[in-house]
Amino acid sequence: MALTIIKGTILSASALGKLDVTPGGYLVAEEGIITGVYPVLPEQFSGAPVEDFGDALILQSFADLHLHAPQYPMLGMGMDLPLLDWLNAYAFPTEARFADTDYARDVYRRLARELVENGTTRVCMFSSLHRPATLILMEKLEKAGVTGYVGKVNMDRNNVPGLLEETTEESRRETLQWLEACTSFPHIKPMLTPRFIPSCSEELLAFLGRLAAERNLPIQSHLSENQAEVELVSSLHPDCAQYWEAYAKYGLWNERTVMAHCVWSDERERQAMKEAGVTVVHCADSNQNICSGVAPVRTMLQEGLRVALGSDIAGGDHLHMFDVVAASIRASKARRILDGWETDFLTVPEGWYLGTSAGAAFFGDAPGFAPGNPLHAIALADDSLPCPHPLTAAERLERCVYTRQQGAIRAVWSAGRKVYSGT
Ligand code: GUN
Ligand code: FE
């Protein structure tokens, strides 16, 4: 690994809405950690091998902060029901298949490869409730070169008994056994994953909250995605004035928490996220597909919340983050219309920041290709697109976001390692 020097048009999102471009530049990493981006190769590296990608764009790779691995087999299907019915009709029966470890092995190997080949190198990912399949998922991600967090899902009530549900005792036991069994993966770590408030008993939520505190574990779940869900939570937890309070009450609400959706979070709920340092994961495709709504992302950003992006497959129908970035920009335009043209939509550099730097921040990175960050990058050749007149690097990026080209990714680095090399 020692020294990596990548040459190309280097572009990174160093702040929300800001792109740093170094044409013909050098991105240098030592022992997998970025040293810097240089317009001219510093003397100390002269003579070292350079991977020259010509005019290709050298970009940060993506962070997908919310997706459901066991919903990969239903990608692009079953979008004709709202959330709670959709879970029962499609998501739960699909996830139930992962009791079969051979099936899990096959699906998860494909998923891990597809993620890496399309430039997603960091994830916060839901597995199913099955411990063996969750360990297989972690193994396949590790092997393919994906980094980040995976959670065995906890769900002990309001699910489908006999198909996809565990008892409280099983959920506790399986979670502890899973945590013991998954310590050997260097790049894939466990994350506690109560599916969402309606799926978990109070006893289970309390257990998970204690576990998170004792072992300093991160937490992922869903929040205020859909109006019927919000009402259900309110009826299940009448002592909580708002949805988020049911997480907070059980110790599942802190700066290591990621909450998907937050479509219906009002100002008070958003303030609670800001104060606790919770990261919101915006999942624009999913919110549209299962008729959840349009999250107020611009308002969240203005209020100073941490916001990143998620594909949320298979509520979302796009795994590739170029599409997810484009969807978040489109959703912000719908939000602008709904807001009476009072809120600004996201620009492409802003969308790009959310899909890269904002997600990487959850893993402790500074924005962009900052020195000290682990090397997570892609080399993207857009030369198959027509280019009758010269384009700026920002224009090239915009075109790639909207018209993702199959095979345009030439190489991917994850945590310093080259994990994909295309043609
Ligand atoms: N809320 C609880 N489970 C799920 C899920 O699998 N997908 C989505 N979009 N929302 C959820
Ligand atoms: Fe989800």
Image (tube, rainbow, N blue to C red):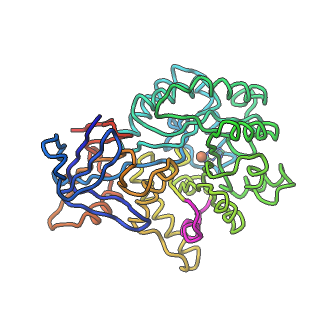
The residue sitting at 57% across, 28% down in the picture is 134
Residue 232 image position (x, y, % from top left): 78, 51
**Above or below for 5 versus 157:** below
What span is colored magenta in the figure? 293-306
Whether the magenta-drawn stretch holds residue 264 is answered as no
**Above or below for 32 versus 131:** below
What is the count of numbered marks? Answer: 0
**Above or below for 6 versus 104:** below
Residue 56 image position (x, y, % from top left): 21, 52
**Above or below for 78 versus 351:** above
Residue 48 image position (x, y, % from top left): 16, 41
**Between 180 and 155, the one nearer to me in the picture:** 180
Within the image, what quadrant is residue 265 found in? bottom right
Task: Locate the C terminus by quadrant.
Answer: top left
**Between 132 and 60, the one nearer to me in the picture:** 60
Residue 193 image position (x, y, % from top left): 65, 39
Within the image, what quadrant is residue 170 found in? top right
Q: Residue furthest left?
A: 47
The residue sitting at 74% across, 46% down in the picture is 251
The residue sitting at 17% across, 57% down in the picture is 40
Horizontal side, residue 325 vs residue 260: left or right:
left
Horizontal side, residue 137 vs residue 43: left or right:
right
Whether the magenta-drawn stretch holds residue 298 is answered as yes
**Between 205 and 285, the one nearer to me in the picture:** 205
Within the image, what quadrant is residue 195 found in? top right
Horizontal side, residue 409 vs residue 285: left or right:
left
Horizontal side, residue 20 vs residue 247: left or right:
left
Q: Residue furthest front?
A: 44
Task: Locate the N terminus by quadrant.
Answer: top left
